[in-house]
Image: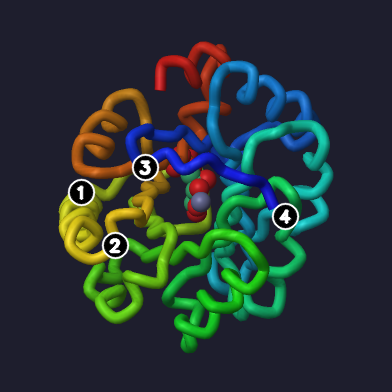
Amino acid sequence: MIQIEEKGNSMNRLAPSILSADFSRLGEQVSLIEKAGAHIIHVDVMDGHFVPNISFGATVMKSLYGKTTLPFDVHLMIENPDQYMEEFVTDNTEFITVHTEACPHLHRSIQHIKSLGVKAGVSLNPATPVSVLETIIEDLDLVLIMSVNPGFGGQKFIPFSLDKIKTLKNMKDKRNPKLEIEIDGGINLDNIKTVTDAGVEIVVAGSSVFGAPDIKKRVKEL
Ligand code: DX5
Ligand code: ZN
């Protein structure tokens, strides 16, 4: 697994989501965002059950192996993630994130991710309150706040997500300062500063990066 230098949460990182990339030129576009200064590759895995869309699986992610040195941030929007998570462990994998709504045994799933030697993340759908993490917050490396209903790129940021970031930041400061907070959905040039000011360290951006007329320029702007 990739050795990530401890950055003490002092640096924000940009994680373009390849869901919005041109799949026929995936390797090329990933090299482009890497050269432009992106920090992480966000990998959106959808199964058509947990979310109403199918994206791609581990084979597509692994095709990028050797084409980039950027860490992979695997966002599993699938039912029964425990059955598949091992397939997503590569030398580039930094995080595997599961949805609390898909994990009846969340503690076990988190331990499972850690046993694979990668960092463990939990994602919350917009309607799921931060309070569901009360008992487990100390065990987590990452919390991903969904600021759109998962399933599709290009949706609009849901404003109450900002309150959830603030609540989570509070919990983090008190109970797990090393936790990283990630936001995913509807992030663009207009709202990126608001979310990082509220405490977000990792920003996912799909359509605002890959839908831009000049991808390289957009990565730098964000
Ligand atoms: C949504 C995915 C997101 C999405 C972000 O289900 O988890 O990562 O691709 O796309 P934008 O930035 O376009 O909202
Ligand atoms: Zn995502």
Residue ID for mark 1: 162
Judge from the rendering whether residue 205 lies leftward or rightward of residue 200; answer left or right.
right
Q: Quadrant of the C terminus?
A: top left
Q: Residue at 47%, 62% (x, y): give it.
A: 121
**Circle 4 sits in a helix, a strand or a loop, which is it?**
loop
Residue type of the residue flagged with mark 2: Asn
**Of callouts 4 and 2, which one flags the residue occurring earlier in the amino acid sequence?**
4
**Circle 2 sits in a helix, a strand or a loop, which is it?**
loop
Q: Is residue 154 visible?
A: no
Residue ID for mark 4: 56
**Circle 1 sits in a helix, a strand or a loop, which is it?**
helix
Residue type of the residue flagged with mark 3: Gly
**Of callouts 1 and 4, which one flags the residue occurring earlier in the amino acid sequence?**
4
- Tell me the distance, in whole angstroms, between the alpha carbons under discs 4 and 2: 33 Å
**Of callouts 3 and 2, which one flags the residue occurring earlier in the amino acid sequence?**
3
The reply to whether discs 3 and 2 touch (Cβ–Cβ < 8 Å) is: no
- Tell me the distance, in whole angstroms, between the alpha carbons under discs 3 and 4: 32 Å
Q: Position of residue 130 (x, y in %)?
A: 25, 68
Q: Position of residue 185 (x, y in %)?
A: 40, 46
Answer yes or no: disc 4 within 8 Å of ligand 1: no
Residue ID for mark 3: 8
The reply to whether discs 1 and 3 touch (Cβ–Cβ < 8 Å) is: no
**Of callouts 3 and 4, which one flags the residue occurring earlier in the amino acid sequence?**
3
Few, some or many C-alpha atoms within 10 Å of disc 4 (few <14, some 14-19, many ≥20)? some
Residue ID for mark 2: 176
Judge from the rendering whether residue 128 lies leftward or rightward of residue 100; answer left or right.
left
